[in-house]
Amino acid sequence: MKLISLLAAMLMILASCTTAPNSENERQMLVQQSTDSLKQMQAEDSSLHSFLEHSYGYAIFPSVGKGGFIAGGAYGRGILYEKGRMIGYSDLSQATVGLQAGGQSYSELVVFEQQRDFDRFIGGRFTFSANASAVAIKTGAASAAQYTDGVAVFVEPIGGLMVEAAIGGQQFTYIPR
């Protein structure tokens, strides 16, 4: 029960960050970073383009920062696309507890198979539990990727080093454009 309370408190702290960038300049910068991150992922794995074309929508988080020592957390801002069209902003908050030490940053792409999966996301009914897994971007990864509960997740490391055997979950928020 203490573990659940700790994770809930950490998620509330991380969720207090604002989802949408405050200024027009920050919004444009986030859109550009998201576009660049997606292009980089597609350059690493050319099958990702086709995977996205057959999806209903996706959220791209160009830079998620993660760190921890026993208790940990992560946060990143991103852009949400529906059928290839930007519709708003999203943020990702993560809380973990367990054996972990270090820090890292990575890009994360969350792909929604169908409209009902996308609607769960924008409706605030979407979280990843401890057993969710992500596919590392590399050549051919998207062609072999499978949706789990209507969602596929891809990550591309940016930098840092983190060792962990921890449990936790990711929570997402959405703000329309």
Image (spheres, helix red, strand yellow):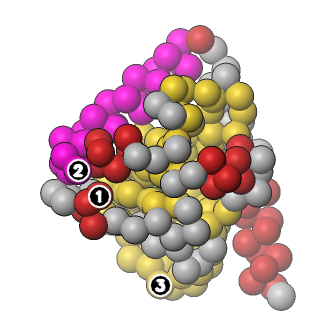
Residue denoted by label 3 = 165
Report if the CB atoms under discs 3 and 2 are less than 8 Å apart.
Answer: no
Residue denoted by label 2 = 47
- In the rendered structure, does residue 122 fall within the stretch colored magenta? no
Compared to 83, does 5 lie above or below? below
Compared to 117, does 6 lie above or below? below
- In the rendered structure, does residue 26 fall within the stretch colored magenta? yes
Tag 3: amino acid? Ala
Q: Earlier in the sequence, mark 3 or mark 2?
A: 2
Q: Residue at x 19, y 46 (%)?
A: 46
Tag 1: amino acid? Ala
Element type where label 2 sits in the image: helix
Q: Earlier in the sequence, mark 2 or mark 1?
A: 2
The stretch of residues the image draws in magenta is 25-47
Q: CA distance from mark 1 to mark 3?
A: 26 Å
Q: Position of residue 165 (x, y in %)?
A: 47, 84
Relative placement, left or right, of 1 versus 120 is: right
Element type where label 1 sits in the image: helix
Question: Within 10 Å of the Cα at label 2, are there few (<14), some (14-19), or many (20+) other Cα atoms?
Answer: some
In the rendered image, which quarter contains the N terminus?
bottom right
Q: Position of residue 107 (x, y in %)?
A: 39, 48
Q: Residue at x 80, y 65 (%)?
A: 9
Tag 2: amino acid? Ser
Q: Residue at x 70, y 40 (%)?
A: 174
Compared to 145, does 156 lie above or below? above
